Image (spheres, coloured by chain):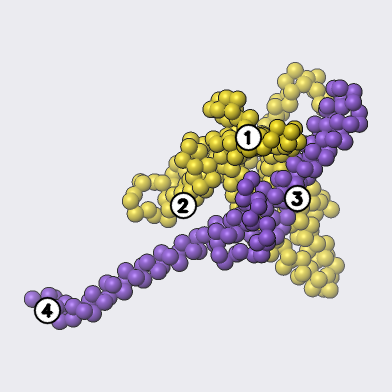
Amino acid sequence: MAGTDPIHQFVIEDMIPIHLSGDGTAGSGLNLSFTNSSLFMVATVVAVSAYMLLAPGKRSLVPNRLQLTSELMYEFIANMLRSSAGKQGMVFFPFVFSLFAFILVANLFGMVPYFFTVTSHIIVTFALAMLVISVVTIYGFAKHGLKFFKLFAPSGIPAPVLLIVVPIEVVSFLSRPISLSVRLFGNILAGHITLKVFTGFVVSLGAAGFLGWLGALLPLTMGVALTALEFLVAAVQAYVFAVLTSMYLNDAVHPSH
Amino acid sequence: MQEPQDTEGRPDSAKGVTGDLASRIASAKRERQLEDNRASGGGSDNSGIARGLRLGSEFAAAILVGTGIGYVIDQGLKTSPWGLLIMLLVGFAAGVLNVIRAVAEMDKEAKASPASGAGSDAVTEKPDDF
């Protein structure tokens, strides 16, 4: 039944084991092994870079199809960032675009059978979310100094109420990386497990003779529909991550609400 | 000699054609804009499951973070269980705040695209202040 185990697809395997300063037993020392997850992260970065370098091609005024797709993607993210973080937020364009492209391509790679889905591990999405929040915090303090704390204290609120509002705002701020990472991870993980379970039914029912064959038609249709839905989810989640990133960056650029 | 005569023969209709073309381009552009708005507005959280997961994770994350902070405070100051209890409530409030903000933003997106202005008009007035 290993073929239909819905969790098996998320197992991380060492491809090139690199163990530093450990005695070789599990959990000791520093494990820097090159895993299947690392492989697909590298593949994602290579694919995005190659696409963005090669697609513009001759940079002709009248673009061909490939150039058009890359320009559409550029303008899509640029407009989104401009509308939510304003002109000053555009310094973060390379950051937001890289995040969007990485997540989108990693999600889409995950849709290829036998490929590993990088974003289905919460540590990966959490690292991305922490990167966003660190950029927001560091840039906010570097740009505005202590005025960045105004983010936690909306203007025009009497001092006694601040006592209640400030902790709430702080917790709300600290919950952002959690919700950002859990959303992406949860969507991708749940989608892939559902897909595997439904298509697994096809295999088990198909082994049960003619009636099983007829019954297998139902999960097969579901599998086809879910595949389409998963492609949608892959794109939507990359977009949602980018939108929320630019909204949080807006807080760093303009801390007073 | 033939061409100018042709256009001179029916200047009104020629003008009519270009005027017609201009208006057709304008209306096509307008339609395109509407479609773009609809696509960008509805595309982010079109499906109910995406919206549900969004709100759920916003709410749960704030409670988890609040409770976690309370637990750490208790560990440090030996005030158990008060830090945990108080920060749990603060986390709950932050979760509600997160959800209100998310809904306000979804509502704004839905307002921007006339096609998908699906209900919930009652909440639009207040949360815009946040």
In which chain is the residue bearing label 2? Answer: A
Residue under disc 4 on the same chain as residue under disc 3: yes
| Crowd around label 3: few <14 · some 14–19 · many ≥20 (10 Å) | some
In which chain is the residue bearing label 4? Answer: B
Picture disc at residue B56: 3
Residue under disc 4 on the same chain as residue under disc 2: no
Q: Position of residue A18 (x, y in %)?
A: 70, 25
Q: Amino acid at mark 3?
A: Gly
Badge 1 marks a residue whose secondary structure is: helix
Residue, disc 1:
A151
Q: Amino acid at mark 1?
A: Leu
Residue, disc 4:
B5
Q: Position of residue A232 (x, y in %)?
A: 63, 57
Q: Quadrant of residue B76?
A: top right
In the rendered image, is residue A207 in sight?
A: yes
- Of the two numbered discs 2 and 1 in the rendering, the one whose residue sits closer to the viewer: 1
- Mark 4 or mark 3, earlier in chain: 4
Picture disc at residue A72: 2
Q: Do callouts 2 and 3 mark residues in contact (Cβ within 8 Å)?
A: no
Chain corresponding to yellow in the figure = A
> Which residue in the rendered view is the most extreme toward the top?
A21
Q: Position of residue B90 (x, y in %)?
A: 79, 38
In the rendered image, is residue A102 in sight?
A: no
Q: Quadrant of residue A65?
A: bottom left
Residue at (72% x, 20% y) in the render: A20
Q: Calculate the distance from the C-alpha at mark 1 to the C-alpha at mark 4.
A: 72 Å
Q: Quadrant of residue B10?
A: bottom left
Q: Colour of chain B?
A: purple
As rendered, which of B5 and B69 lies closer to the eye? Answer: B69
Q: Position of residue A39 (x, y in %)?
A: 64, 37
